[in-house]
Image (tube, rainbow, N blue to C red):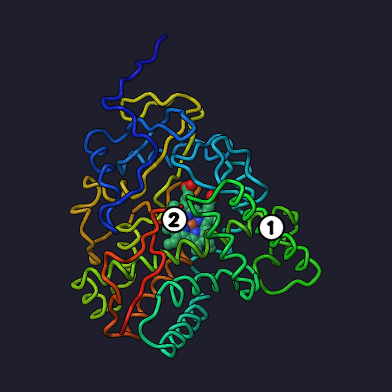
């Protein structure tokens, strides 16, 4: 009984491409691949041969398919990522993004109720206040300013700190560690050092909160009694990293995109109620998770006529999937009025972003407050001089000099 072995039409892509010719468009080679086939051969940095999915329906199907595993030890990074070994070990306790059910379910169940739409709505006033305070400070310091340092990074960072119960005064430490961790050019030793240091920092905090509980998520998880300190520390590391780097880059890159699409910017200024729709479209158009996610086949699976063998790793290009013309008309156009729902910027399936409701509220509040505060906000440098994060695991801008 022989399965059909397929012959890929083109030589394998050598490592997932991340270099861009336009700050907002995914690497052009991804669209070229998708036009040819929704799934292509990809050579992983460890030399193994796997797959790259570039179409919307196939990416979504793989993310929903339980024959594909998220277990960390089965993955291969599709290009060098400092914190991912070429042959990774199993996830640390609590770091459930690298686990399958039933372990994944056990952790996620402890958290779901804390991230519902309703819970996040309760945070809305607080988020609005934090946003206003940062805009006050930025205005006081005067034009020009770096929007990333003054606005995009501190707001989500402060919000996730308050939610978890992490002292924001320690931000230099964890923002630095996160940067080292997510920098593609960091050495493996540097990245591991940063990860260990973050984990130890949060473990000490969990131990302290066990003795002196407060009104925060870490204390609530301790009180729940289902998880030990090491597991809670692992969860806290995951939430702290995911909670500030991602939204921060959507705010920074999103503002850059709005400033470069003046008709869209004018439409949002004219009608702030457009913001809910605008945020979904910015998520689709910018898709900042540009490396991975990956899944490993647990058995032989046929995908669009190709045979993915058990053990092979499949990379889903979320930026390419979200620009699939079969799913979104005129995909390369930023159109804040289109319906972008169903986009894959938060992933799909059981690992779909836990923090998406929080991120949405931070972005809606952030964009509207920023635009109403500064009616003539503009770039303070030439657009070509904005430093893009092609060298980071999460795409965005390193800084965004603005004037008003
Ligand atoms: C998972 C994107 C904000 C926490 C994910 C995944 C994506 C993503 C694509 C799926 C990864 C996979 O399938 O392997 C984003 C984007 C954000 C954002 C674009 C901002 C705009 C946040 C925030 C938090 C958060 C604010 C925390 C409060 C998580 C967690 C997971 C996750 C814990 C793992 C879920 C699981 O494995 O079950 N995110 N995220 N994210 N995100 Fe987010």
Q: Residue 326: where, in percent of width, then height?
A: 22, 45
Q: Earlier in the sequence, mark 2 or mark 1?
A: 1
| Contact between labelled residues 1 and 2, with CB atoms less than 8 Å apart | no
Q: Is residue 355 visible?
A: no
Number of callouts = 2
Q: What residue sits 30% from the left and 41% below the top?
A: 55
Q: Quadrant of residue 169?
A: bottom right
Q: Is residue 95 visible?
A: yes
Position of the C terminus, as image quadrant, is bottom left
Whether residue 49 is situated above or below residue 185 in the rendered picture: above
Q: Is residue 132 left or right of residue 284?
A: right
Q: Which residue is mark 2?
A: 394
Whether residue 142 is situated above or below residue 231 in the rendered picture: below
Is disc 1 placed on a helix, strand or loop?
helix
Q: What residue sits 40% from the left and 75% below the top?
A: 147
Disc 1 residue lies near ligand 1 with CB under 8 A:
no
Is disc 2 placed on a helix, strand or loop?
loop
Check disc 1: other Cα within 10 Å, few if <14, some if 14-19, many if 20+: many
Q: Which mark is residue 233?
A: 1
Q: What residue sits 61% from the left and 74% below the top?
A: 168
Q: Which residue is farthest top?
A: 1
Foreground mark, 2 or 1, reads: 2
């Amino acid at each position: 009984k022989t399965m059909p072995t397929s012959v890929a039409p083109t030589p394998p892509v050598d490592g997932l491409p991340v270099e861009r010719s336009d700050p907002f468009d995914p690497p052009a080679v991804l669209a070229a691949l998708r036009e040819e086939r929704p799934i292509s051969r990809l050579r992983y940095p460890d030399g193994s041969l796997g797959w790259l999915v570039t179409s919307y329906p196939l990416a979504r199907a793989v993310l929903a398919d339980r024959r594909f595993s998220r277990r960390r030890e089965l993955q291969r990074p599709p290009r060098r990522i400092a914190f991912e070994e070429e042959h990774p070990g199993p996830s640390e306790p609590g770091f459930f993004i690298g686990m399958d059910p039933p372990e994944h379910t056990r952790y996620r169940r402890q958290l779901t109720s804390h991230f519902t739409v309703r819970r996040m709505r309760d945070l809305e006033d607080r988020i609005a206040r934090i946003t206003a305070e940062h805009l006050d400070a930025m205005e006081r310091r005067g034009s020009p300013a770096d929007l990333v340092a003054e606005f995009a990074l501190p707001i989500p960072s402060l919000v996730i700190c308050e939610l978890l119960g992490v002292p924001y005064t320690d931000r230099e430490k964890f923002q630095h560690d996160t940067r080292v961790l997510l920098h593609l050019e960091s050495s493996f030793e540097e990245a591991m050092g940063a990860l260990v240091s973050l984990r130890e920092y949060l473990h000490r905090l969990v131990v302290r909160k066990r003795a002196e509980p407060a009104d925060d998520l870490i204390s609530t998880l301790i009180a729940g009694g289902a998880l030990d300190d090491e597991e809670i520390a692992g969860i806290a590391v995951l939430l702290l990293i995911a909670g500030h780097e991602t939204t921060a880059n959507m705010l920074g890159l999103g503002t850059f995109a709005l400033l470069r699409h003046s008709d869209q910017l004018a439409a949002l200024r004219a009608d702030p109620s457009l913001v809910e729709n605008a945020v979904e479209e910015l998520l689709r158009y910018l898709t900042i998770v540009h490396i991975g996610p990956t899944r490993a086949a647990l058995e032989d699976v046929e995908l669009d006529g190709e045979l993915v063998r058990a053990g092979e790793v499949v990379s889903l290009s979320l930026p390419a999937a979200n620009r699939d013309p079969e799913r979104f008309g005129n995909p390369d156009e930023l159109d804040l009025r289109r319906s972008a729902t169903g986009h894959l910027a938060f992933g799909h399936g059981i690992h779909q972003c836990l923090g998406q409701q929080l991120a949405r509220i931070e972005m809606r509040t952030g964009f509207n407050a920023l635009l109403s505060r500064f009616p003539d906000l503009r770039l303070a440098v030439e657009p070509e001089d904005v430093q893009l994060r092609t060298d980071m695991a999460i795409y965005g801008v390193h800084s965004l000099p603005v004037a008003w």
